Image (cartoon, rainbow, N blue to C red):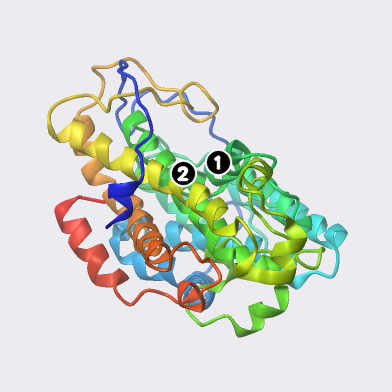
Amino acid sequence: MFLKEIYRPCQVNGARIVYKNAFRSSKRAFSSTGSLRTPITEEEVQGAHKYCVGLLSKYDRPSYTLSSFIPPHARSFYLALRALNVSLSLIPETTSSPTIGLMRLQFWRDAISKILAGNPPKEPVAILLASAISDLHERTEGRARISKGWLTRLVSSREQTLTNDPYTNIAALESYAENTYSTLMYLTLSALPMTSVTADHVASHIGKAVGIAAVLRGLPLVAFPTAQAQSPHGGGSASLGLSGGARQGAVMLPLDVMAQAGVKEEEVLRRGADAEGLRDAVFTVATRASDHLITAQQMLTNLRAGEDVGHDFEHEGEEGHEYDAPGLSRESPLDEVNRAFGVFMPAIGTRLWLDRLQEHDFDVFRPELLRSDWRLPWKAYWAFRQKNI
């Protein structure tokens, strides 16, 4: 039995959806010109590219594998963005205290401002990101740019991982996933470039699923930080959503879910997988991740049937999600989604991992669940060919 057979889809309501052309009349709040003021040599860009690829290969293998599905003209931006995500994720593990971690986060806030001003610091991720943004600016003659608010959101959302503060409820966990993994997808869509309520909507659901699953996957290593040293190669702390944390041992499940399932943090830290109610709590959280994947797939099915996606985009009207009236787009919503499909490929790895979690009866401590899935490359290939998540 597959997860899609036992998990309930998110409830949706009919709604009017509006669409937007990739370039024309965007209302998003962009910053800076995107052109470089400080020259970057080709040698520096090549070195930065090599560095970012190496970082992903070591710490975020799924993103490294799925990079081939991103259009070549946007691939450098994708690699730099995902490398930035890795760098932010590693801050708790590479700093001795939350205070120093906050200083590193501030470095990246400042770096983002400099990158968008065309004056990046001499740091490999910043160099490649600045080069890719400059290329986007030139390709689109300044019509497409990258949102500073979204980049800054990636940094700010990582503050919670410095101290392993618990999620108060499952909605807070979803908000974290939206601010990290969904935002990574929004930014990648901008680099295609694409400004589409439909593509953003699909990305939101997939990003939430990916983020929730990442927190679940990292639960054993946050609960038992010394286990990180024995973590199998291929996943990496960045892809798992881990933190080294200032606190030795924490159970990063929503407090409301733990209370409902009768899970006590001290029991998990003492008994691990045998803690009472833990599998029920993991099942509840995994269900929410699967709900979002099912909802995204239903949206694609609706579009192929010539219908709208079936429900409102809850973030429409927020910063970066403002769209013009229908009729301006040269592409249909289905064409937009198909053109952006490479951005949605993390859904495939998340589905594979959730299926494996179910096979192990939601025992998130099984070591097999920390290993990268050898099936991802060919599963992703067929999903991309069929445009089906």
- The residue that disc 1 covers is 174
Q: Amino acid at mark 2?
A: Arg
Residue 288: mark in rendering: 2
Point out residue 35 in the picture as x, y percentages from the top left corner: 52, 47
Q: Tell me the element at label 1.
A: helix
Q: What crowding class fits label 1: few (fewer than 14 Cα within 10 Å), some (14-19), or many (20 or more)? A: many
- Nearer to me, 260 or 325: 260
Residue sitting at 66 percent across and 46 percent down? 157
Left of 266 or right of it: where is 198?
left
Residue sitting at 52 percent across and 69 percent down? 41
Disc nearest the viewer among 2 and 1: 2
Q: Is residue 211 visible?
A: no
Depicted 39 relative to depicted 139: above or below: below
Point out residue 236 in the picture as x, y percentages from the top left corner: 55, 73
Q: Tell me the element at label 2.
A: helix
Residue sitting at 51 percent across and 78 percent down? 367
- Nearer to me, 336 or 204: 204
Q: What crowding class fits label 2: few (fewer than 14 Cα within 10 Å), some (14-19), or many (20 or more)? A: many
Depicted 153 relative to depicted 211: above or below: above
Point out residue 29 in the picture as x, y percentages from the top left corner: 54, 29
Residue placed furthest toward the left: 305
Q: Amino acid at mark 1?
A: Glu
Residue 378: mark in rendering: none
Tell me if label 2 and label 1 are in contact, CB under 8 Å: yes
Left of 303 or right of it: where is 362?
right
How far apart, in angstroms, are the residues tagged by discs 2 and 1?
A: 9 Å
The image quadrant where one finds the N terminus is bottom left
Residue 229, quarter of picture: bottom right
- Nearer to me, 26 or 298: 298
Residue 25, quarter of picture: top left
Point out residue 383 in the picture as x, y percentages from the top left corner: 21, 58
Depicted 27 relative to depicted 173: above or below: above
